Image (spheres, rainbow, N blue to C red):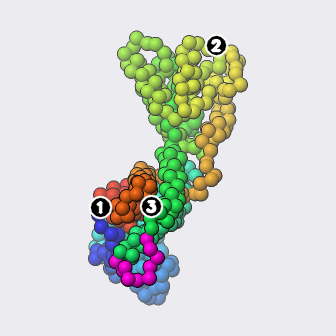
């Protein structure tokens, strides 16, 4: 591990398409590196006035884009941003073309012919990190924002991109660093008029740091649900409408629906947002005793899905009396962390009712709103935690957990009367863990893993 490097200027210039490979009104090609201005001048000519290398930053300019063969490719807009005031911290440029995938590919070829090379996945954001434009938690927030599937997830990622986690941990880092600095100042300059170093005077500082780290670590469970969704198993005996309910929730025919019992023989998985909550739905085989070996495997997988689920949707046919199989489904729901009981086929006369069930008709969509409200009530947002201060991935949680363990070990060492240098070793371990969280301390394997998640062009 090494200290975070000073801002760098890469010798090569990179380029990539930054928008999707589909027809759209606008498509963007990005360029970054030391030769950006020269490269953009070779492929783009403003309709009037000076070349882009002489234009002010962040000013859109209309002009003509030429292909690698010198022929006119597009009439489009271009803009430049000079180092260090750009996304990457280097000279950058963007071409805002008409959104034909062919035009964008040809624009990229022209940039390669002009001296740029293909950017690797996440290379723009990696350069932003290396140039001190963002830390690792902010870099991870970029990909979380791209992947966000709910409004809450997007808000949390946007606030993390603004540095919310870093602001929360920087204060802890500075206070712990101050303890180390005081110790070494007394040790290195004994003749100076420096306040004597006493560990007992810093125990309250460490206790406060431990409490803050503990609260931050506790956000990981909520952050994981926000980012990855809730594991949700749809349970019920055959032909109660589980697959129809799945299709109604996701909005299209994801699962096969027939009147033949046992049609679903394996779990069918899909994601959907209900009441602002991302659900990772698993439509399971109907729970019943069966001699069919394939169906039996499906039933076992249904039971396993129920045991692994954070939420169970227990589906019961409201048009027929409850059976022993229905009661087995209800028992599985009672043993789940959270459950919602659904009375299906609500368009038919009810053979039974109870106050804790939600009547739903998958054919008409009746009751889906009530189902969404029930899901939202079971997983409400934690208003006490500001947006952006939820840890959302295992790397962040592991670093915070390790820092917390070191701080607690330092407090235990003080209580046991261990010498200051041993206590300081624990504090330095906490600083190292917090440094890995933000990127003050760089590990190549960690950064490679983070930026490998990015798409090309970001």
Indicate yes or no whether the magenta region holds residue 306.
no
Task: State whether residue 367 is above or below residue 122.
Answer: above
Alpha carbon separation for disc pair 3 and 2: 54 Å
Q: Quadrant of residue 441?
A: bottom left
Whether residue 179 can be seen here: yes
The residue at which mark 2 appears reads as 321
How many residues crowd mark 2 within 10 Å: few (<14), some (14–19), many (20+)?
few
Q: Which residue lies at the image location 43% right of the left edge and 58% below the top edge?
A: 414
Alpha carbon separation for disc pair 1 and 3: 15 Å
Mark 1 / mark 3, whichever is N-terminal: 3
| Residue 227 position in % (x across, y down) | 50, 49
Q: Nearest to the eye among marks 3 and 2: give it.
A: 3
Helix, strand or loop status at disc 3: helix
Q: Which residue lies at the image location 56% right of the left edge and 12% below the top edge?
A: 324
18 with respect to 114 (left or right) = right
Is the N terminus in the top left, top right, bottom left or bottom right quadrant? bottom left
Mark 2 / mark 1, whichever is N-terminal: 2
For the residue pair 138 and 266, the one nearer the viewer reads as 138
| Residue 123 position in % (x across, y down) | 35, 65
| Residue 329 position in % (x across, y down) | 54, 21
Q: Which residue lies at the image location 52% right of the left edge and 61% below the top edge?
A: 204
For the residue pair 71 and 404, the one nearer the viewer reads as 404
Mark 3 / mark 2, whichever is N-terminal: 3
**Numbered circle sitting on residue 137:** 3
Helix, strand or loop status at disc 1: helix
**Numbered circle sitting on residue 444:** 1
Q: Report the span colored magenta.
A: 188-197
């Amino acid at each position: 591990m090494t200290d975070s490097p000073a801002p760098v200027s890469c010798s090569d210039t990179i380029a990539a398409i930054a928008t999707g490979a589909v027809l759209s009104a606008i498509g963007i090609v990005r360029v970054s590196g030391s030769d950006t201005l020269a490269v953009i001048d070779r492929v783009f000519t403003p309709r009037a006035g000076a070349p882009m290398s002489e234009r002010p930053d962040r000013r859109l300019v209309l002009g003509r884009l030429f292909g690698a063969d010198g022929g006119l490719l597009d009439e489009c807009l271009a803009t430049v941003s000079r180092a260090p005031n750009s996304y990457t911290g280097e000279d950058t440029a963007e071409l805002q073309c008409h959104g034909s995938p062919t035009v964008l590919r040809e624009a990229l070829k022209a940039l390669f012919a002009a001296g740029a090379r293909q950017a690797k996945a996440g290379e723009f954001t990696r350069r932003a990190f290396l140039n001190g434009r963002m830390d690792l938690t902010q870099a991870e927030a970029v990909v979380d924002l791209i992947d966000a599937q709910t409004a809450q997830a997007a808000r949390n990622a946007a606030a993390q991109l603004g540095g919310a986690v870093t602001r929360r941990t920087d204060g802890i880092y500075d206070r712990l660093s101050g303890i180390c600095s005081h110790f070494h100042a007394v040790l290195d300059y004994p003749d100076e008029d420096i306040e004597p170093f006493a560990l007992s005077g810093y125990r309250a500082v460490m206790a406060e740091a431990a409490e803050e780290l503990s609260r931050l670590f506790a956000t990981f469970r909520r952050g994981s649900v926000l980012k990855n969704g809730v594991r949700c198993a749809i349970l019920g005996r055959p032909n109660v409408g589980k697959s129809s309910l799945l299709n109604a929730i996701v909005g299209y025919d994801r699962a096969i629906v027939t009147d033949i019992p046992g049609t679903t023989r394996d779990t069918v998985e899909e994601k959907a947002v209900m009441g602002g909550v991302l659900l990772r739905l698993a439509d399971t085989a109907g729970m019943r005793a069966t001699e069919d070996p394939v169906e039996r495997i499906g039933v076992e997988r249904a039971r396993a899905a129920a045991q692994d689920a954070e939420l169970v949707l227990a589906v019961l046919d409201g048009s027929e009396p409850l059976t022993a199989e229905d009661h087995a489904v209800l028992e599985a729901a009672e043993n789940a962390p959270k459950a919602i009981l659904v009375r299906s086929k609500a368009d038919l006369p009810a053979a039974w009712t109870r106050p804790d069930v939600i009547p739903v008709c998958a054919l008409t969509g009746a009751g889906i709103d009530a189902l969404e409200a029930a899901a939202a009530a079971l997983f409400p947002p934690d208003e006490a935690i500001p947006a952006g201060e939820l840890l959302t991935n295992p790397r962040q949680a592991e670093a915070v957990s390790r820092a917390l363990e070191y701080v607690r070990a330092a407090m235990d060492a003080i209580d046991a009367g261990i010498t200051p240098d041993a206590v300081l070793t624990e504090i330095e371990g906490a600083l190292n863990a917090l440094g890995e969280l933000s990127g003050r301390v760089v590990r190549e394997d960690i950064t490679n893993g983070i930026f490998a998640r990015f798409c090309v062009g970001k």
